[in-house]
Image (cartoon, rainbow, N blue to C red):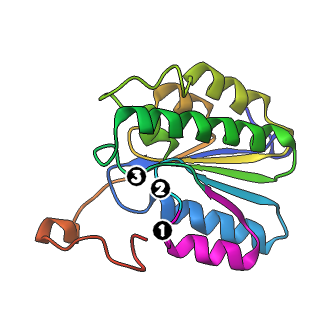
Amino acid sequence: MTTKSQGLVLVYTGDGKGKTTAAIGVAIRAKGQGKRVCFIQFIKAPGRSYGEKVIFDGVGIENYQTGVGFTWTKTPEEHREALKTGWSLAKEKIMSGDYDLVILDELNNALAIETFPVDDVLPLEDILSTIDGRPEGMHLVITGRSANEKVKEKADLITEMKPLKHYYDKGIPAVEGIEF
């Protein structure tokens, strides 16, 4: 059983909208309480103007977009390199002891990729041992669809977002200020 001093592992997963949004809320709340926060996005690519990045920069939440976009927009090798770089950065930030909260946004999605191999660049056993070996008191938030069962075993909280109705079904694309 995890104790408050050990830090918590929160997992937001499922097919519904709101996983990243929930993590953003936790980041803002933690920063408001004077906590040191690092937010790493595994799929989103740098260079785009994401609403959360603008706010994070303004309030001093360290944030990184380490991806190259959705899996169908780049080659498998580009994604593999981005995942390798992203995990290296994430592990460095987690193990540094410099943060009270580290958010690994869309890590679940990355671990669930089946269209090309990712195990060698995003090794599940290394992720699990990093979760276990993180500094005392550090909280982790891990988001994304299709959470790995072994990651879920490490969680103190799992929230599954379930879609009941979505405007995408009416052909409405991603909305600025809602999705990005």
The reply to whether discs 1 and 2 touch (Cβ–Cβ < 8 Å) is yes
Q: Position of residue 45 (x, y in %)?
A: 48, 56
Name the residue beneath numbered marker 3. 69
Question: Residue 118, position in %: x, y?
Answer: 45, 26
Chain-order first, disc 3 or disc 1: 1
- Give the alpha-carbon distance from disc 1 to disc 2, as whole Å: 9 Å
* Figure check: 156 above or below 18: above
Instruction: Give the residue at mark 1.
Output: 48
- Name the residue at the left extreme: 170
Question: Which quadrant, please, contains the C terminus?
Answer: bottom left
- Residue at (53, 33) in percent of width and height: 152
| Element assignment for label 3 | loop
Q: Over which residues does the magenta segment extend?
A: 47-64
**Which circle, 1 or 2, is nearer the viewer?**
1
- x 53%, y 25%: residue: 150
What type is the residue that disc 1 sits on? Answer: Arg
Q: Dot 2 corresponds to which residue? A: 44
Does 121 sit above or below residue 25? above
Task: Confirm whether the magenta stretch covers residue 58.
Answer: yes
